[in-house]
Image: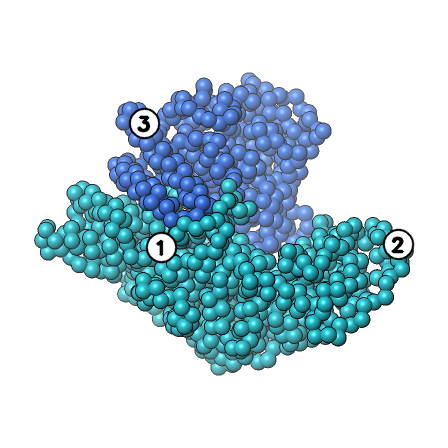
Chain colours: A cyan, B blue
């Protein structure tokens, strides 16, 4: 093999993930070696092993050989006949061939596309046939309830919302998802957290007669405008905060509100006279406080307190909001910006409208506890009430049995019930019936059967494939579609051993997809897959983008969730994620997108113009792929490659200077972001990767960092044209969409892999690819509907069976 | 609430479990048990406690008048300094533990470019413990440096149940922009886990209390809690053993891990019970309701919690932000009725500078409360104060002009014998405060090559005005 030049090696190291070589072909060898004649294009319907191997050695091994190992891969010893034994490598090849990423576009000698696809097909056929004969369903350790699932379970059981972040450690994210079993570590802190959470949930659900005074703090994000009514607040108010708080007992509570001040410690928004702050519980006014415009840190502080108010136990909506004193356009000396607190100094001048803003709300109490009145959660728990002392045990047993069944997600065993009742007895003899039930509930919530999703299987020889029991299948199904415990229907079917029949599964999937709980697919699956959590961390510059504040960001996330939810409920094609012509907007978003005639804060379904179709036109994605003061075509390109095409680019080489270090102007005119990224195109070491990444992101350049449509960037016209890595011309969002649809199989496969990771609770490995391909093929017959993908996963071996392992696998971290 | 970085590697956590046998998380004893069996390999190594306290608005002593009148640091160098005219006078009873370093600069808090001019108040807090120049932004792309306390916490934090804690007194913004183009992340936090991760500060003493001692407002409530937890843990163990029957070997092993955690919690409970029944005196504060109204009370409460956290070895690192830039709080105990920020703009009038000195002195006078507690708590073969390094300073110098020269700084504690104490060092003109901080890190056993804009290490045990340059 001829010696590889060092320049090539440097390029090779930097382009590991894509294996793209530098632009110039001959430069990769010091002297051209005599080459055998190119193999003829495949004309036969199926390529023979010989033809495949010749193809690889001719086109691939010049880069992917033992010496160069471009992308960490050598194909010198690849034998298509051994594709099954070399499946991890073969799957990598299939992935790149299908995406059209290999051989790289710049390479002069390449097979014609039909041959490359035929090769991929041949590999797939061989691997799929072997998988059909001897399927590998994979394996994972048992999962435990993560934060979101724990909170949902509590809500389902007791009807209260508890902030679990106070108790449970953050979930580890693996492959983008927070429910991957082998990333779920145990620790004493976790054990502690479960104990504390159990105690806290119990005391909130039942009320706590012994509640001691403490403070609960709710902070209003400083980055949100407070000029409009917030969700849940009474009409006629603006700003402030509205939360559902669970009061532990009947008693006196003081509500303390801190207002924002300016740099000198004076009230922000002080020129406004007669401002009033209202504290209401469940919409009913409890206190009205007048705000003294002369409030200041220096004199009496910026804190306002209500007198002690008597509140009953249970969930109540608490709102602290200002009374709205005027409507209509504001005509100021300077245009108002949405992030009203971006500069609190501005409130000091006249000619500028500023209003007081709430910083945080603290609920202090209870003092003088008078007892615990009936609450909604108590009614849910006490489905019976003993009239006499002799009825107590029977009633308690009934309650404990019901709650344990719900918590353990299967009928509670007699032995388990016998283990739980002593807790009731202990609590009862300590105090009374209520206390007995409370103690038993605490034990239930701390039980491993609640917090762990254990799937016992009968003893088998190691290495065999075992089927998950119907009861456990019911749990897997409900956590997949609802992120919650199975309901009565599922449990019944499971108990009768009918659940695993394909027809029943299909029917249940259809039923579950339209249930309200199916919003988990958008809120938990799609939100993680699409990285919607990053929207919160992005804060566009207040002065460059005066129309953006945190409320808009939150609305954007809601929009995308509602959008995905609509596709699920209507069982549309998955491709509509990219192509759908509808979305959900409220007045704020509609103004931002330029959609007329939408009024109010409720979300409505609207049709969008062509350039806003699909998720690539939605604010959430556009915001999370930008930075504070400019768009980032690189981040947008990376997001598309990683999230939609399953092929993330490799990280940049070290010591790349920030874009801000490049000049912002040249020859007297300002440069656009695209022009500042010139280095990506000029420098061949950069171009090898950025030729792939940048055009994808630049196609979206008409969307500014807040997702607004623009035709100018820095006063210069936006140029959204480019050439995709496979040669397709891109121009704007429509062009990008059709280019991506040309690779729709890759997109659908990426979607399936992500959905499977979420559904299975483990990473999708090379041996799952036959299942993934089968699911996509089958979905094609059903127009790629969501239900076909979900059903495909649910009916797959990976979902219903697992390999019985004898020894610890590498996946188990010890 | 978990203050540290999100993904704590499991191995590290297990290592922390197996190697150190920490005292109960659920309750604490003051005074601490003197000897307890430890399987730690370096059990004989003394555990260094570290608190970094930030005060804002510099000091009166950093002004010209203040320097001549010795309003912050004493006139004499060495060990025979007279604290009487200074704001440090309240520390006199603890002068043996005191190392004062004067005349250091915090250059990275200055404005480097025209847009940064005027933003001192909003970036200084981020500079204090990082000694790095913060990147001016109101957006989410904040960048400063890793802070002193986090360098220590990264090295030793996993020896304790809680790696580090960050406390504050003032109600901070925690989001959005502050002024002069700086994000509030810079103004609110003094502790940075990495150069892009400012850590949130806890203001509510109850939140700190719950973290340290668990649920239960009174000792009786906590005792009841412990009993209940014990029986629940028994039930969990029995359940787990039953559940293991139907599982594969790997899952069984995983549940064994879980049982280990269960047993660890059980052991902690038993330890507390044993100590309680042995009748050792305990002075636990009752669970605070929430944030006290008075500054005095709030600061002392936070000091109480820190002292007990150290005694129980729940954590060894605190970052404590005593005030916030631009705060206009009035401190009635000083007799000065002007707000803090307004008072700091003294306009070079002597009477106003003297007022500012009164405020400085008041703040310093709160520290002996803490020193006393630490001195009276046995730890190893000395006291907690012997094994502590308490750093107090401000990144600002003369607050009227917002300069960062000749900033106030002192260290209290003997650092497990590595600090002599009873020393006033005047650093050569232009010495970066980072030099002293580099020495602090060395004292703590978390030495690093470079920190902030340090040009070398300032020897904290000698008045020889030389800086040992970097190797």
- 10 Å crowding of disc 3: few (<14), some (14-19), many (20+): some
Residue B208 in the image: above or below residue A277: above
Distance (Cα) linking label 2 and label 1:
67 Å
Mark 2, chain letter? A
- Kindly indicate whether the residue at mark 3 contacts the one at mark 1 (C-beta within 8 angstroms): no
Q: Quadrant of residue A30?
A: bottom right
Q: Quadrant of residue A65?
A: bottom right
Residue B275: mark in rendering: 3
Judge from the rendering whether residue B22 lies leftward or rightward of residue A609; answer left or right: left
Mark 3, chain letter? B
Image coordinates for residue B158, horizontal then vertical, percent: 50, 36
Image coordinates for residue A84, horizontal then vertical, percent: 63, 59
Q: Residue at x 46, y 26 (%)?
A: B39
Q: Residue at x 55, y 38 (%)?
A: B154
A431 and B342: which one is in front? A431
Mark 1, chain letter? A
Element marked by disc 1: loop
Q: Residue at x 67, y 71 (%)?
A: A699
Judge from the rendering whether residue A543 lies leftward or rightward of residue B216; answer left or right: right
In this view of the protein, can residue A810 be seen by the observer?
yes
Residue A30: mark in rendering: 2
Of labels 2 and 3, the one closer to you = 2
On the image, numbered disc 1 is attached to which residue? A162
Image coordinates for residue A162, horizontal then vertical, percent: 35, 55
Q: Is disc 1 in the same subunit as disc 3?
A: no
Distance (Cα) linking label 1 and label 3:
34 Å
Nearest to N terminus: mark 2 or mark 1: 2
Q: Quadrant of residue A358?
A: bottom left
């Amino acid at each position: 093999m001829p010696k590889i030049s060092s320049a090539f090696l440097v390029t090779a190291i930097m382009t590991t993930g894509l294996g793209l070589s530098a632009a110039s072909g001959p430069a990769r060898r010091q002297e051209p070696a005599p080459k055998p004649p190119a193999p003829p294009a495949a004309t036969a319907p199926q390529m023979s092993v010989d033809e495949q191997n010749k193809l690889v050695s001719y086109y691939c091994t010049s880069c992917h050989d033992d010496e160069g190992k471009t992308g960490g891969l050598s194909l010198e010893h690849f034998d298509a006949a051994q594709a099954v034994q070399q499946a991890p490598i073969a799957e990598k090849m299939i992935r790149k061939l299908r995406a059209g990423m290999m051989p790289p576009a710049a390479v002069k000698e390449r097979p014609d596309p039909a041959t490359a696809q035929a090769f991929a097909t041949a590999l797939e056929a061989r691997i799929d046939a072997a998988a059909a004969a001897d399927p590998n369903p994979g394996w994972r350790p048992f999962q435990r309830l993560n934060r979101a699932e724990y909170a949902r379970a509590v809500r389902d059981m007791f009807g209260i919302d508890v902030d679990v972040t106070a108790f449970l450690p953050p979930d580890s994210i693996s492959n983008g998802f927070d429910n991957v079993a082998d990333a779920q570590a145990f620790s004493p802190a976790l054990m502690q957290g479960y104990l504390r959470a159990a105690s806290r949930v119990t005391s909130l659900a039942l009320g706590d007669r012994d509640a001691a005074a403490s403070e609960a703090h709710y902070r209003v994000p400083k980055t949100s405008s407070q000029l409009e009514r917030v969700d849940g607040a009474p009409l006629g108010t603006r700003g402030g905060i509205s939360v559902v708080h669970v009061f532990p007992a009947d008693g006196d509570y003081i509500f303390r509100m801190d207002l924002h001040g300016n740099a000198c410690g004076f009230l922000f928004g002080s020129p406004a006279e007669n401002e009033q702050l209202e504290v209401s519980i469940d919409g009913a006014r409890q206190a009205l406080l007048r705000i003294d415009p002369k409030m200041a840190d220096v004199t009496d502080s910026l804190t306002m307190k209500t007198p002690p108010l008597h509140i009953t136990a249970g969930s109540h909506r608490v709102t602290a909001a200002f009374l709205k004193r005027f409507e209509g356009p504001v005509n100021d000396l300077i245009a108002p910006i949405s992030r009203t607190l971006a500069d609190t100094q501005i409130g000091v001048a006249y000619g500028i409208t500023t209003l007081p803003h709430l910083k945080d709300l603290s609920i202090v109490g209870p003092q003088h506890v008078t007892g615990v009145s009936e609450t909604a959660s108590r009614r849910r728990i006490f489905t019976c009430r003993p009239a006499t002392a002799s009825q107590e045990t029977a009633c308690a047993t009934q309650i404990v049995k019901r709650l344990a069944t719900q918590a353990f997600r299967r009928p509670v065993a007699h032995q388990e019930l016998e283990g739980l009742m002593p807790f009731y007895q202990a609590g009862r003899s300590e105090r009374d019936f209520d206390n007995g039930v409370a103690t038993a509930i605490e034990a239930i919530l701390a039980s491993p059967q609640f917090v762990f999703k254990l799937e016992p299987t009968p003893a088998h020889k190691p290495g065999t494939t075992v089927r998950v029991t119907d009861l456990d299948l019911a749990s897997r199904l409900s956590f997949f579609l609802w992120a919650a415990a199975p309901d009565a229907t599922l449990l019944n079917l499971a108990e009768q051993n009918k659940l695993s029949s394909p027809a029943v599964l299909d029917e249940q999937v259809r039923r579950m997809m339209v249930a309200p709980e199916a919003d988990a697919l958008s809120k938990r699956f799609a939100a993680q897959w699409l990285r919607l959590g990053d929207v919160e961390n992005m804060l566009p510059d207040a002065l460059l983008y005066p129309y953006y504040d945190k409320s808009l960001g939150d609305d954007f996330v809601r929009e995308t969730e509602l959008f995905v939810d609509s596709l699920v409920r209507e069982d549309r094609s998955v491709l509509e994620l990219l192509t759908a012509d509808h979305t959900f907007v409220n007045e704020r978003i509609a103004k931002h997108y330029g959609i007329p005639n939408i009024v109010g804060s409720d979300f409505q379904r609207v049709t969008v113009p062509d350039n806003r179709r699909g998720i690539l036109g939605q604010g959430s994605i556009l915001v999370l792929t930008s930075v504070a003061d400019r768009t980032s075509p690189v981040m947008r390109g990376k997001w598309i490659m990683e999230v939609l095409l399953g092929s993330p680019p490799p990280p940049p080489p070290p010591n790349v200077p920030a874009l801000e270090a490049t000049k912002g102007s040249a020859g007297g005119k300002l440069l656009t972001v695209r022009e500042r990224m010139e280095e990506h195109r000029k420098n061949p070491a950069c171009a090898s990767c950025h030729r792939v990444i940048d055009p994808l992101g630049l196609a979206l350049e008409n969307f500014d960092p807040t997702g607004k449509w623009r035709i100018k960037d820095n006063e210069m016209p936006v140029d959204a044209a480019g050439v995709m890595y496979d040669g397709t011309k891109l121009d704007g969002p429509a062009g990008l969409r059709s280019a991506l649809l040309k690779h729709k199989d890759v997109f659908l496969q990426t979607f399936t892999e992500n959905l499977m990771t979420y559904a299975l609770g483990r990473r999708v490995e090379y041996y799952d690819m036959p299942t993934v391909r089968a699911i996509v093929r089958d979905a094609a017959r059903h127009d790629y509907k969501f239900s076909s993908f979900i059903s495909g996963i649910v009916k797959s071996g990976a979902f219903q069976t697992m390999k019985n392992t004898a020894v610890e696998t590498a996946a188990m971290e010890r | 609430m978990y203050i540290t970085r999100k993904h704590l590697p499991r191995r590290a956590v297990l290592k922390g479990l197996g190697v150190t046998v920490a005292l109960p998380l659920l309750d604490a004893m003051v005074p601490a048990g003197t000897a307890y069996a430890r399987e730690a390999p370096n059990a004989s190594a003394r555990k260094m406690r570290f608190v970094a306290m930030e005060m804002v608005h510099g000091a009166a002593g950093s002004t010209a008048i203040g320097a001549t009148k010795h309003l912050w640091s004493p006139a004499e160098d060495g060990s025979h300094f007279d604290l009487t005219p200074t704001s440090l006078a309240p520390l006199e009873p603890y002068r043996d533990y005191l190392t004062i370093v004067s005349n250091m600069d915090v250059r990275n808090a200055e404005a480097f470019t025209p847009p940064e001019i005027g933003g001192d108040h909003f970036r200084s807090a981020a500079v204090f413990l990082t000694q790095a120049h913060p990147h001016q932004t109101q957006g989410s792309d904040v960048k400063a440096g890793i802070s002193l306390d986090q360098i220590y916490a990264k090295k030793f934090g996993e020896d304790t149940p809680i790696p580090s804690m960050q406390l504050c007194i003032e109600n901070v913004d925690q989001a959005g922009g502050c002024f002069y183009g700086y994000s509030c992340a810079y103004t609110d936090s003094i502790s940075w886990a990495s150069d892009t991760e400012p850590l949130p500060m806890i203001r509510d003493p109850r939140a700190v209390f719950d973290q340290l001692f668990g649920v239960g407002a009174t000792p009786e409530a906590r005792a009841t809690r412990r009993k209940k937890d014990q029986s629940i843990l028994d039930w969990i163990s029995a359940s787990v053993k039953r559940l293991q029957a139907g599982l594969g070997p790997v899952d069984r092993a995983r549940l064994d891990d879980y049982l280990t955690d269960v047993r660890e919690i059980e052991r902690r409970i038993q330890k507390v019970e044993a100590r309680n029944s042995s009748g050792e005196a305990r002075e636990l504060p009752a669970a605070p309701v929430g944030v006290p109204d008075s500054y005095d009370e709030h600061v002392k409460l936070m000091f109480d919690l820190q002292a007990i956290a150290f005694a129980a070895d729940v954590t060894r690192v605190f970052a404590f932000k005593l005030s916030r830039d631009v705060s206009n709080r009035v401190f009635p105990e000083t007799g000065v009725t002007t707000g803090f920020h307004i008072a700091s703009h003294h306009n070079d009038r002597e009477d106003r500078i003297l007022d500012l000195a009164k405020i400085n002195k008041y703040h310093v006078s709160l520290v002996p409360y803490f020193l006393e507690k630490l001195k009276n708590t046995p730890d190893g073969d000395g006291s907690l104060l012997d094994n502590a390094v308490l750093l107090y300073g401000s990144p600002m110098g003369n607050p009227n002009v917002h300069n960062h020269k000749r900033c106030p700084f002192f260290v209290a504690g003997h650092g497990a014998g590595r600090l002599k104490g009873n020393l006033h060092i005047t650093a050569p003109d232009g010495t970066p405060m980072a030099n002293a901080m580099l020495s602090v890190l060395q004292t703590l056993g978390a030495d690093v090559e470079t920190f902030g804009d340090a040009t070398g290490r300032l020897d904290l045990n000698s008045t020889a005005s030389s800086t040992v340059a970097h190797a």
